[in-house]
Image (cartoon, grey):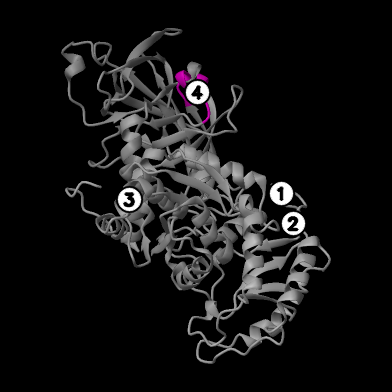
């Protein structure tokens, strides 16, 4: 059992209560059951963390089971992506299973249903079935095929399986109650005809089980003790239990379905259908576009598994759906990257700085710390020369007293280097500054221990030596949607809220130590934010994605509005 010192969420309380009532701890088993019809998103990340977290807490196995019952929408690409995402988050499944592993068993059980008068073949059109199903306030009416003989049902079902009928001509329905208050209990469909190639079973089957039929029975076959679903499956629980009632053997573990609320994330969509729409209609480049709420998109952007797990832990599990501010996720990302990301220097909006009294043709290699958060400090060498790039925003020709960066006649420190003083500027024909000229205090070298090096100045700015600078493409990402709940208003197309400035591509310059960096390497560009090497990067052309700023810039924008 779990330690009582920990505050338990309601799912854990359910499990603890079952254990107190005598359910064997050794029989606990959980599962994460994705449909391989798209890439996993941040909402799935919470479900992954819940199920696998319970497995770790209770030392119980957790299966990864693919609900692959709809070959019209499923692909091996999605299976591979899901496995990669779960592994990347740091979890290992006990067994890799598929609903398709159980197609024969599900079919055999369906035959028993027919023989026991619990299922029948309906040959109505889908439109007619919808009409006869009734409404929440009006009971349904029986299908004209509801009382077909067992023999006829068996014959038709086998012909359906053998591919003798076109799609849409027949379905197998459970025979429950057309007057049930719960609409899902009004003779739900168990099988439909689909002449589609399945990514695992090929063309062996021409009929495929519906989710409600396959899901609970798959849980039962695998011995899942607690089947955890999102809240929209609450009405399905009655049907889940009814299906189990028909085949349950008291000597085996009976799965218990329980529901938790979705945790929607602001300024995103987490519907796989809508995410696919963004990809297919070209609003983003791919499923792993760094603006997407997919796990693969977050990985490519530079988010860490630890940050996502911490986010899931922070928001917890609830019984009521709510909207979580994306700033909380970004805080978790920022907090983790602060611990693990090396500090480097990059200039993204460069202007040339010439140190006029620095010896012509000279260079020196200065020592810089990699990360002040490290337990054992490590250092690297960075080159310094007469000509540098600094950020254009770090200089003002006419500055007020609150501007603590470089200006004419004032001093600032160049990070890890010297104190400099602005002397003059050179401008082009349009009045744009093209060069800043400054002098340096030769005795003020950082870490030298001289009196001059310990002199206090009000500002410190970063820089890159021009002769050594490495050009890089920098992709600056912003939130994909301007509205905090883009699909909250069903009268407005969610794409109306797409942020036209969600991606800006600029050319920047980075220190030469980054030349050997690899995809997914993460850095803090000092004073600018956290950045990650993109998979498009190469030795010939470095490409960085902006992961998150050093501070929450959106909070300031929203406060002004």
Q: Residue at x 35, y 45 (%)?
A: 26
Expressed as whole percent of the image width and height from the top left, the position of residue 207 reads 72, 62
Q: Is residue 487 left or right of residue 258?
A: right
Q: Is residue 407 visible to us here?
A: no
Q: Is residue 247 left or right of residue 448?
A: right
* Residue in the foreground of this view, choosing between 394 and 370: 370
Marks 3/2 in contact by CB < 8 Å: the verdict is no
Residue 466 among magenta residues = no
Segment tinted magenta in the rendering: 510-519
Please tell me the numbered disc located at residue 229. none
Marks 2/1 in contact by CB < 8 Å: the verdict is yes
Q: CA distance from mark 3 to mark 2?
A: 38 Å
- Give the vertical position of 418 relative to 119 (above or below): above
Question: Could you tell me which secondary element the residue under label 1 belongs to?
Answer: loop
What is the crowding at mark 4: few (fewer than 14 residues within 10 Å), some, or many (at least 20)?
Answer: some
The residue that label 2 is drawn on is: 205
Q: Residue at x 69, y 56 (%)?
A: 71
The residue that label 4 is drawn on is: 517
- First-in-chain label (4 vs 1): 1
Q: Quadrant of the C terminus?
A: bottom left
- First-in-chain label (3 vs 4): 3
What is the crowding at mark 2: few (fewer than 14 residues within 10 Å), some, or many (at least 20)?
Answer: some
- Give the vertical position of 237 relative to 535 (above or below): below
Q: CA distance from mark 2 to mark 1?
A: 7 Å
* Residue in the foreground of this view, choosing between 469 and 89: 89
Q: Residue at x 58, y 65 (%)?
A: 213
Q: CA distance from mark 1 to mark 3?
A: 36 Å
Question: Could you tell me which secondary element the residue under label 2 belongs to?
Answer: loop
The residue that label 1 is drawn on is: 201
The residue that label 3 is drawn on is: 24
Q: Is residue 131 visible to us here?
A: yes
The mark closer to the camera, 1 or 3, is 3
């Amino acid at each position: 059992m779990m330690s009582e010192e920990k505050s338990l969420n309601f799912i854990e309380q359910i499990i603890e209560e079952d254990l107190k009532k005598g359910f064997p701890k050794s029989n606990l088993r959980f599962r994460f059951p994705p449909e391989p019809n798209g890439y996993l998103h941040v909402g799935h990340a919470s479900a992954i963390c819940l199920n696998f977290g319970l497995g770790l807490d209770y030392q119980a196995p957790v299966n990864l089971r693919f609900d692959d019952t709809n070959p019209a929408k499923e692909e091996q690409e999605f299976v591979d992506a899901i496995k990669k995402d779960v592994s990347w988050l740091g979890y290992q499944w006990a067994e890799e299973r598929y609903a398709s592993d159980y197609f024969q068993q599900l079919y055999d059980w369906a035959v028993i249903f027919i023989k026991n008068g619990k299922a029948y073949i309906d040959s109505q059109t889908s439109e007619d079935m919808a009409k006869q199903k009734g409404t929440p306030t009006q009971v349904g009416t029986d299908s004209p095929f509801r009382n077909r003989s067992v023999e006829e049902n068996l014959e038709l079902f086998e012909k359906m399986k053998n591919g003798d009928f076109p799609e849409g001509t027949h379905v197998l329905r459970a025979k429950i109650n057309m007057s049930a208050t719960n609409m899902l209990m009004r003779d739900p469909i168990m099988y439909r005809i689909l002449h589609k190639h399945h990514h695992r079973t090929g063309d062996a089957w021409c009929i495929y089980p519906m989710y409600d039929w396959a899901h609970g029975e798959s849980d039962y076959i695998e011995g899942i003790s607690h089947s955890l679903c999102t809240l929209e499956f609450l009405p399905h629980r009655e049907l889940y239990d009814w299906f189990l009632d028909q085949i349950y053997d008291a000597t085996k573990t009976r799965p218990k379905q329980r529901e938790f609320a979705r945790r929607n994330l602001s300024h995103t969509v987490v519907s796989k259908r809508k995410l696919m729409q963004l990809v297919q209609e070209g609003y983003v480049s791919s499923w792993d576009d760094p603006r997407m709420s997919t796990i693969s998109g977050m990985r490519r952007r530079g988010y860490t598994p630890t940050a996502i797990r911490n986010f899931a832990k922070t928001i917890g599990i609830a019984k009521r759906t709510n909207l979580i501010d994306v700033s909380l996720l970004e805080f978790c990302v920022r907090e983790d990257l602060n611990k693990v990301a090396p500090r480097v220097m990059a200039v993204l909006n460069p202007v040339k700085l010439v140190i006029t009294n620095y010896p012509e043709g000279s260079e020196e290699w200065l020592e810089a710390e990699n990360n002040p958060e490290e337990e054992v400090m490590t250092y690297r060498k960075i080159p310094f020369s007469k000509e540098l790039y600094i950020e254009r925003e770090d200089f003002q020709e006419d500055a007020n007293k609150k501007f603590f960066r470089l200006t004419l006649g004032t001093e600032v420190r160049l990070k890890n280097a010297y104190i400099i003083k602005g002397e003059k500027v050179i401008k082009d024909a349009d009045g744009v500054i093209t060069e800043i000229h400054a002098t340096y205090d030769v005795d003020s070298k950082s870490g030298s221990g001289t009196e001059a090096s310990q002199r206090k100045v009000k500002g410190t700015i970063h820089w890159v030596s021009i002769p050594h600078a490495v050009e890089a493409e920098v992709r600056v990402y912003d939130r994909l949607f301007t509205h905090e709940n883009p699909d909250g208003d069903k009268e407005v197309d969610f794409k109306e809220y797409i942020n036209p400035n969600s991606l800006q591509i600029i050319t920047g310059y980075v220190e030469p130590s980054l030349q050997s960096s690899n995809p997914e390497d993460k850095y803090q560009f000092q004073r600018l934010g956290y950045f990650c090497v993109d998979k498009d990067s190469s030795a010939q052309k470095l490409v960085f994605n902006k992961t998150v700023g050093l501070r929450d810039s959106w909070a300031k924008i929203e406060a002004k509005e």
